[in-house]
Amino acid sequence: MKVLLVQPPVEDFYDTGIRTYPLALLYLATKIKNICDVSIVDLRTDIKPIILKDNPFPDLKEYYKKDIYTPLSLFGRYYRFGYTREKIKELIASRRPDIVGISSLFTTYSAEAMEIATICKEIDDSIITVMGGTHPTIFPEYVLKSSSVDFVIRGEGETPFFELISALKSRENSRLSCIPGLCTKKDEKSFVTDINIESNIDMVPDRKFLDSSSYRIGRKNYTFFLASRGCPFQCDFCGKPPVTYRRRNPISIHEEIQACMDINIQSIDFEDDMLTLDKTYFNEVLNLFNGKGLTLSAMNGIYSETLDTKMLDNMFKSGFRRLNFSLVDIDRSVIHKEHRFYSENFLRLLPWIESSAFLVETHFIIGLPEQKPESVIDMLVFLMGKRLLLGPSIFYLAPNTPIFDNLFNNIHDVDVKSLRSSFMFPVNSLFQRGVTYTLIKLVRFINLVKHIIDKESGMESLSEIPAIFSGKNASIDKHIITKFLKDQRLIAYDINKKMFYEERQDNGIINHFFREAKGKIIKGFKTSNSLTFDV
C-alpha cells in the first residue's frame, strides 16, 4: 500500500519561509513506515512563488500596491507559494498513491488543502483522502461534506493514522468506528469522534523522509523540534484546540539530537507551545544540547514568567542566540480581558537581557478587541527605547475562539479567506484598516531606524537619519524619510509613473505618535547605540 503525505501550497501576500518545516507529517510517516510504502511531498517549501494576477481582496488594493517602492514597504503582490495545480496533479499521478494524507493547519488556507483532495479524486476516484490538522480538527463535519474527503483525523494523528492504514490494509472496515480521533462518513452522514491526544510522545521522527538542504535558516540546515506538547492556558484569541501539556522523556530527546546531527542539521527551532513552562525540565533539556554546537531558537513557546537569569545563561550556553518573546500588549487590562498571562517577569528581566549577548525580538498584537490605538502607540514608544526588534502581528479572527464565537454563529457566516493577518479584519471598530496600516508603518519606521543606528554609530538625533542613505535608491529614501519626519506624512514612489504619492494613512495616529515619541530615545537592535527622537 502506497501512502503519500502532502503539505499544500498557500496563497497570500507573504509567506514566512522559515516556518514551513512539515514536522507533523514527519511524525506520521515515521509511525507508519513499517506497515506501508510512505513518502512526503512538500508542495510549498523551496519553490519559487508565483505572482497571481488577481487576489480575493479588492478592498486591500488601496493598501497593497504593486510596483511601489518605499523603505517602509509592506506588501505589494499576491502570491501562490508552492506548485501550480497542473504541476501538483502531475506529481501526485506519478506517485500513484493508494492513500493521500493532507495537512490543513489553518482555516484561511483550507481551500488550498481541499484543492489537493480534489486533484486526487480527479486522478483516480479510488484514492483514499485523509485530512488532518487544526482546521479539520475544529470543523470535521464541514470538511467531510466534501465529496473529495474520505476521512478526517482530529487532534494528534500518529495513532489514528496508523490504525486507519492497518484497518484498510486488512480490509477490516468494522474497526474504523473504534479508532480514536478518526471521523468517517456514510450516506452523507458524518460520524465525528473526540480529539485524539497521544499518550506516548517519545517517538523520534525519521528526518530522512525530507531533504534537509531544502530547509534553511540563513545558511544553516534547520529542523523543527518538540520537547513537549500542549498548553495549559486558553487565551481568548488562540484558536488551537485545548490539548493536555505533556513532556517528552529526555532519553528520546537525546536520541533525536544525535539523529539530527547525523544528517547535518545545524539549527533547531523548538515548536513547543510552552517550551519553558517547567523550569527544571527545560534546564534538563538544555543540558542535553550543551556542547553540541547547534544553534537553537524558539519562535514560539518562550513562557517568560518562568525565566530567570540562570536559565537565560543556560540557554545561551546551549546554543540560543536569539530570543522571541510574546508580549501581546503592555496594557494589563487588555491582557486580563483576553485571559492571557501578563508578561511582568519579561519587563523585569529586560534590563538584564539588553545587557546580554542575546538578540531579542518582541512580538505584540495590533487590533485586539479591548485595545485602543493610543495604548499601542505607548507600547511602540516604550519598545523603541529598548535594545530589541519590534515584531508586530495584526490581529486576525481564529475560529474556535471566544472572540470568533461572539461575532459569528458558525464558519459559514464569514469568508474564511479573511481570517488572516494580512486582511486587517477590523474586529475592533477603533482599528479600521487605515489605523492598523498606519501603526504597522510606524513599526517599520522604528525598526528601520534601529538597523541604521546599529551600523552608524555617533548619531545623536533622528534628524540626522536622512543624510546617511546611500545606494541606487538613496535620493528616493531620503525624500520619503525627510517628508515623514518634517510633515508627518507617509509617501511612496510609483516606479511606473516615476512620481511620489501620499499613502493611505491615519494622520491622527501619526501625529499622536510624534507627540508621544518626541524627546524619547530610540535604541538599536544589535547594539546599544541610541539617538533622540528630536523632530
Image (cartoon, rainbow, N blue to C red):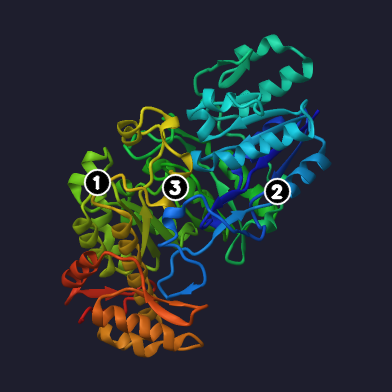
Q: Secondary structure at mark 3?
A: loop
Q: What residue is at 78 percent from the left and 20 percent from the top? A: 169
Q: Is residue 49 visible?
A: yes
Residue at image mark 1:
342
Disc 2 is placed on an element classified as loop
Residue holding disc 2:
210
The residues tagged by marks 3 and 2 sit, at their Cα atoms, a distance apart of 28 Å
Residue depth check, mark 3 versus mark 2: number of the one nearer the observer: 3
Residue 219 position within the rendered picture, expressed as x and y whole percent measured from the top left: 61, 67
Q: Alpha-carbon neighbours of circle 1 within 10 Å: few (<14), some, or many (≥20)?
A: many
- Which numbered mark, 3 or 1, is in the foreground of this view? 3
Q: Residue at x 47, y 29 (%)?
A: 138
* Vertical relation: 57 (above or below) 476: above
Q: Position of residue 176 (x, y in %)?
A: 65, 14
Q: Residue furthest top?
A: 174
Q: Which comes sooner in the sequence, label 3 or label 1?
A: 1
Q: What amino acid does circle 2 point to?
A: Leu
Q: Quadrant of the C terminus?
A: bottom left
Where residue 220 appears, as percent x and y from the top left, is: 61, 63
Q: Which mark is residue 420?
A: 3
Marks 1 and 2 sit apart, C-alpha to C-alpha, by: 39 Å
Residue 208 seen from this side: no
Which mark, residue 522? none
Which residue is pictured at 36% across the width and 81% down the height?
480
Q: Position of residue 193 (x, y in %)?
A: 53, 17
Q: Residue at x 42, y 51 (%)?
A: 423
| Mark 3 or mark 2: whose residue is earlier in sequence | 2
* Image quarter of residue 476: bottom left
Dot 3 amino acid type: Arg
* 525 on left or right of 68: left
**370 or 275: nearer the viewer:** 370
